[in-house]
């Protein structure tokens, strides 16, 4: 008969987490990011100190950005491992809500453990406590409820016996995977209880591969056989399933071209003859032409987000049908799609078997080559001496020319995500984009998380001056931990991406660029000095050629490198693209808004929403 061991609830939690293992024999929760305050320092803090390297603790600079690092870590490792994040109650906890939303949208596992109010309520209201006048059970941590997959409040020590296994079950479930919040009442953290010894026996968590319903496989196979112009849209589910090679083999065997979403880009190399780039708003010319003709769109591991679908105008063939291969029925049945619910790797194998020797009709491979020529033109280095500022496309070209097979480029918000999706020629595994939530401030912390997960990779972070200003403090953490990566900071003196969108929607240039904001003095921010002040190696590149040389030189350092280059805020990518549904005011505006509204109304008529 198993005995018991007397531990505080916080000690029991960290002990249990330290013995939850992957099939490869590693901890599933690698460690804990922590910023301590009065809601977690005495209980969780002391427990983490006591367990030491059995469950390492890392200090961050900001609760949101240390959570971003944890999210990037999990994304890089294809959801096979994760990290935890703990904060105090109040602002420390609510700082993490944005990161929880980011993880939720992207279906990524991270364990949030914010401190909470006193379960015994004796000292109420405690410092930083949110009081609901009508509900005595509410705390600030209830903000997590809509942005996590599983929420629990630990208000008794024995709650751990049920909430911890439930938390890991969610984080390791490929269909329901996402963030978990365990709001830990601060007095309960310190309470002792006699836990069964068996509770702390090591446990292996396996990532299952759900099999599809044979009837769904046969229905989809019949649709593929009947299609004259099928196209595959590959999303992040392909990568999380480890089905990259399977998708390439399926496309080759059955002669079906494929496109990659932001989450799916880099699953297979850009040089695969069936890879036509990206679809939708930031899609390639060749890819969007395929989408326009397609009579069957086969989504594999994608949510069909509006950027992917051009707000449902890119799939223009009135006869088109939609298939969705996905782990969750919620995603698989969106927009009237014919579902095939199951793991991407398993489904592709079963579909290929059902199709046998079937091959789709020939497609236009020349369009793909013409697209590559267009990319080469807009990303080429400027010729000779010029006073013009480089474009974002030229900056991408500079990084592309010095990239290696080990380079991973990453970004999250602003101009660069769209530019990178449409222009970057990714090697397999060489692309990391947070574009489900498109969260400004993810970039620097995310780059650190990628490097922690894949230390052998050459991580290059693209970030605009606007995103850098929002969240840069984990640069200091990377310096302290000696985590090297390269930041290419493009300074266009404002929010250039949204400024362009504002004008495209008929708006006046207003409050995006510093020059159009209500300020007394235009800021001249010395980003080089700022990064140097946090301990990074930082320098300015005056030209595209200098940028290339500085990226190569950065690879020999053991700390982050920040390279600042001024760019022109006006040009877009210069290639590709498609309409995006951003509502334009219908009345009460000047003539420029009337013109924009007329264009908007015309595009609305092209939306093909349901099969």
Image: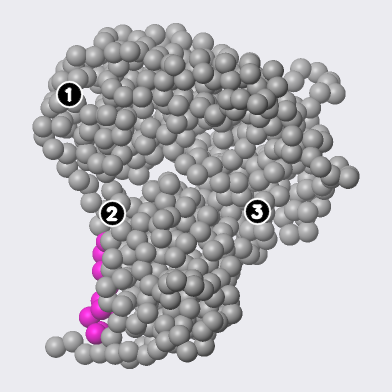
Query: Tag 2's secondary structure?
Result: loop
Q: Give the residue at x 84% y 44%.
A: 519
Q: Measure the alpha-carbon separation of dots 3 and 1.
A: 47 Å
- Compare marks 2 and 3 and give the one earlier in the sequence: 2
Q: Is residue 241 highlighted in magenta? A: no
Return the residue nearer the eye: 211 or 558.
211
In the image, residue 476 above or below residue 174: below
**Residue indicated by mark 2:** 173
Residue 49 locus on image (x, y percent)? 50, 81
Screen quadrant of the N terminus: bottom left
Q: Give the residue at x 19% y 14%.
A: 226
Return the residue nearer the eye: 146 or 167.
146
Highlighted range, magenta: 196-205
**Residue indicated by mark 3:** 471
Q: Is residue 114 visible?
A: no
Q: Residues within 10 Å of mark 2 (few under 14, many from 20)?
A: some
């Amino acid at each position: 008969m198993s005995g018991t061991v007397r531990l505080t609830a916080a000690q029991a939690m960290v002990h249990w987490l330290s013995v939850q293992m992957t099939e490869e024999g590693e901890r599933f929760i690698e460690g804990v990011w922590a910023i301590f305050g009065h809601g977690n320092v005495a209980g969780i803090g002391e427990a983490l100190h006591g367990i030491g390297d059995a469950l390492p603790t890392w200090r961050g600079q900001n609760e949101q950005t240390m959570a971003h690092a944890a999210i990037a870590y999990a994304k890089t490792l294809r959801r096979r491992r994760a990290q935890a994040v703990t904060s105090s109650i109040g602002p420390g906890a609510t700082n993490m809500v944005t990161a929880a939303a980011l993880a939720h949208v992207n279906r990524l596992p991270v364990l949030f453990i914010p401190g909470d109010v006193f379960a015994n309520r004796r000292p109420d209201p405690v410092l930083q406590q949110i009081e609901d006048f009508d509900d005595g059970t509410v705390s600030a941590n209830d903000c997590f409820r809509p942005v996590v997959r599983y929420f629990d409040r630990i208000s008794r020590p024995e709650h751990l016996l049920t909430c911890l296994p439930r938390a890991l079950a969610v984080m390791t479930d490929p269909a329901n995977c996402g963030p978990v919040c365990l709001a830990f009442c601060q007095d309960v953290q310190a309470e002792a209880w006699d836990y069964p010894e068996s509770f702390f026996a090591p446990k292996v968590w396996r990532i299952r591969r759900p099999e599809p319903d044979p009837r769904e496989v046969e229905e989809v196979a019949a649709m593929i056989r009947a299609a004259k112009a099928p196209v595959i849209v590959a999303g992040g589910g392909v990568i999380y399933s480890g089905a990259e090679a399977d998708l390439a083999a399926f496309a080759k065997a059955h002669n079906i071209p494929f496109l990659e979403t932001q989450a799916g880009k880099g699953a297979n190399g850009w040089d695969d003859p069936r890879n036509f780039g990206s679809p939708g708003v930031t899609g390639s010319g060749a890819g969007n032409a395929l989408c326009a003709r397609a009579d069957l769109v086969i989504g594999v591991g994608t949510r069909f987000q509006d950027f992917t679908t051009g707000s449902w105008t890119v799939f223009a063939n009135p006869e088109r049908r939609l298939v969705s291969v996905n782990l969750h029925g919620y995603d698989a049945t969106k927009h009237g799609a014919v579902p095939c619910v199951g793991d991407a790797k398993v489904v592709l194998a079963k579909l290929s078997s059902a199709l046998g020797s079937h091959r789709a009709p020939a497609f236009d491979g020349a369009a793909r080559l013409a697209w590559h020529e267009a990319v080469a033109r807009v990303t080429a280095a400027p010729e000779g001496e010029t006073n013009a500022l480089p474009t974002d496309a030229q900056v991408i070209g500079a990084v592309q020319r010095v990239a290696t097979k080990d380079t991973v480029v990453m970004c999250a918000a602003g101009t660069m995500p769209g530019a990178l999706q449409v222009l970057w020629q990714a090697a397999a595994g060489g692309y990391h984009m947070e574009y489900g939530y498109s969260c400004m401030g993810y970039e620097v912390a995310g780059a650190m998380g990628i490097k922690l997960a894949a230390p052998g990779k050459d991580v290059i972070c693209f970030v605009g001056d606007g995103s850098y200003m929002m969240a840069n403090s984990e640069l200091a953490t990377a310096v302290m931990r000696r985590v090297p990566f390269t930041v290419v900071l493009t300074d266009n003196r404002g929010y250039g991406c949204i400024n362009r969108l504002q004008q495209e929607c008929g708006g006046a240039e207003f409050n995006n660029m510093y020059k159009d904001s209500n300020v007394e003095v235009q800021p001249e921010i010395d980003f080089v000095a700022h990064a140097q002040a946090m301990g990074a190696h930082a320098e300015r590149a005056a030209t595209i050629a200098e940028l290339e040389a500085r990226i190569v030189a950065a690879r020999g350092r053991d700390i982050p490198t920040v390279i600042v280059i001024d760019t022109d805020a006006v040009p877009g990518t210069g290639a590709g693209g498609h309409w995006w549904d951003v509502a334009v005011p219908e009345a009460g505006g000047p003539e420029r808004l009337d013109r924009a509204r007329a264009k908007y109304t015309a595009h609305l008529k092209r939306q093909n929403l349901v099969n």
